[in-house]
């Protein structure tokens, strides 16, 4: 087990280095100059003063050094927990800006991923047993899983926000409130959270339901199910074994779908102007803010890698066959 975890840690560490390197490169090969973009918003009429300010801020952000020195400096600062200073919100540290956005993204991602996975698997398992429910779940599931996150977000914003007027369509909470632990603020936070959550939950729900339904049917037709049935085993026992075996590919699918779900969350945040990492990425792109972009990408990469690592360990704990293989290999 520890040897397996060690191998996985090495693979994830290598993936982390490669992914962070690519994320560092992408903003720097984008067209445009972040310093000039920042100074274009300043009302400075003197060309000489503007040139001096350009040279000063270029040195402050470390953009006046060769790329290889910037890369080494980035890793050195990263180990110290320093992600640099934001260009668009100078002189605020990038880490402080990201930490303000991370709770909103996590508060949207975790409930939608966990609830859609649990509810979708349950619905799929029921659909595999009930023919009438199967004839309803299957077409609805295909429609839901084919919906783009952004399209469903726009549809919900139009129907529930604009036409019905029952839920707000933008922001994370009412702009007239300040962040505090009070019932007024929490209620505003929840009402602004509902539409982004539904956009992600509904799309993911259909895919999990279809996957579980297909896996249950496959397991019920497997040799061990037929053998148990021939021995006179209760139907409930056979379905229980089928459900356990069908859960294993669903756990693997959860790891595979994390990147897609995260990208859907970022797009959903942009549609609703939700103050999470997705909206922050859009703002950083518009302002050519290299440091916020690479810091946000870093948090995204670390989050996906940690989640995949946890799922890998959970899979080993859930599936006894993998533990037997590891024990046999060690022997």
Image (tube, rainbow, N blue to C red):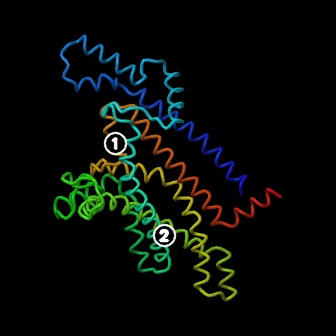
Instruction: Give the number of the mark in front: 1 or 2.
Output: 1
In the displayed structure image, the side of residue 251 where residue 261 appears, left or right: left
Counting from the top left corner in percent of width and height, residue 303 is at: 49, 49
- Which quarter of the picture shows residue 32? top left
- Gap between marks 1 and 2 measured at Cα: 33 Å
Residue 260 lies, with reference to residue 143, above or below; the image says above
Q: Going from the N terminus, do you reach mark 1 or mark 2 first?
A: 2
Residue 330 lies, with reference to residue 285, above or below; the image says below
Numbered tag placed on residue 121 in the rendering: 2
Q: Which residue is disc 1 drawn over?
A: 280
User: Dot 1: few (<14), some (14–19), or many (≥20) neighbours within 10 Å?
Assistant: many
Residue in the image at 59% along x and 85% along y? 235
Q: Quadrant of the C terminus?
A: bottom right
Front residue (pair 69, 194): 69
Residue in the image at 43% along x and 59% along y? 110
Residue 331 lies, with reference to residue 224, above or below; the image says above
| In the image, farthest residue toward the right | 331
Q: Quadrant of the N terminus?
A: bottom right
Residue in the image at 52% along x and 33% along y? 21
Front residue (pair 307, 240): 307
Counting from the top left corner in percent of width and height, residue 307 is at: 53, 54
In the displayed structure image, the side of residue 5 where residue 54 appears, left or right: left
Helix, strand or loop for disc 2: helix
């Amino acid at each position: 087990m520890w040897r397996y975890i060690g191998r996985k840690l090495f693979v994830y560490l290598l993936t982390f280095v490669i992914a962070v390197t690519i994320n560092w490169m992408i903003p720097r090969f984008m067209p445009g100059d972040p310093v000039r973009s920042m100074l274009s918003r300043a009302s400075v009429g003197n060309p000489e003063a503007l040139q001096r300010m350009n040279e000063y801020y270029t040195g402050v952000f470390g953009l006046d050094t060769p790329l290889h020195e910037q890369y080494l400096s980035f890793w050195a600062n990263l180990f110290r927990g320093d992600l640099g200073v934001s260009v668009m919100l100078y002189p605020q540290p990038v880490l402080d800006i990201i930490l303000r956005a991370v709770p909103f993204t996590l508060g949207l991602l975790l409930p939608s991923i966990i609830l859609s996975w649990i509810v979708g698997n349950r619905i799929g398992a029921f659909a595999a047993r009930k023919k009438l429910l199967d004839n309803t779940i299957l077409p609805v599931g295909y429609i839901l899983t084919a919906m783009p996150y952004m399209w469903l977000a726009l549809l919900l914003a139009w129907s529930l926000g604009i036409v019905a007027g029952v839920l707000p369509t933008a922001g994370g909470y009412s702009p007239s409130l300040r962040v505090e632990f009070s019932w007024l603020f929490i209620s505003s936070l929840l009402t602004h959270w509902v539409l982004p959550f539904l956009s992600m939950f509904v799309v993911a729900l259909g895919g999990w339901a279809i996957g579980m339904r297909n896996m249950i049917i496959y397991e019920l037709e497997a040799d061990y199910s037929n053998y148990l049935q021939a021995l006179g085993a209760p139907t409930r026992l056979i379905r229980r074994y089928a459900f356990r075996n069908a859960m294993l590919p669903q756990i693997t699918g959860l790891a595979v779908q994390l990147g897609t779900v995260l990208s859907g969350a970022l797009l959903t945040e942009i549609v609703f102007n939700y103050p999470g990492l997705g909206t922050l990425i859009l703002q950083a792109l518009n302002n050519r803010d290299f440091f916020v972009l690479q810091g946000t990408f870093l948090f995204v990469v670390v989050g996906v890698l940690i989640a995949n690592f946890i799922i890998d360990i959970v899979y080993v704990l859930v599936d006894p066959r993998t533990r037997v293989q590891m024990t046999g290999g060690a022997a």
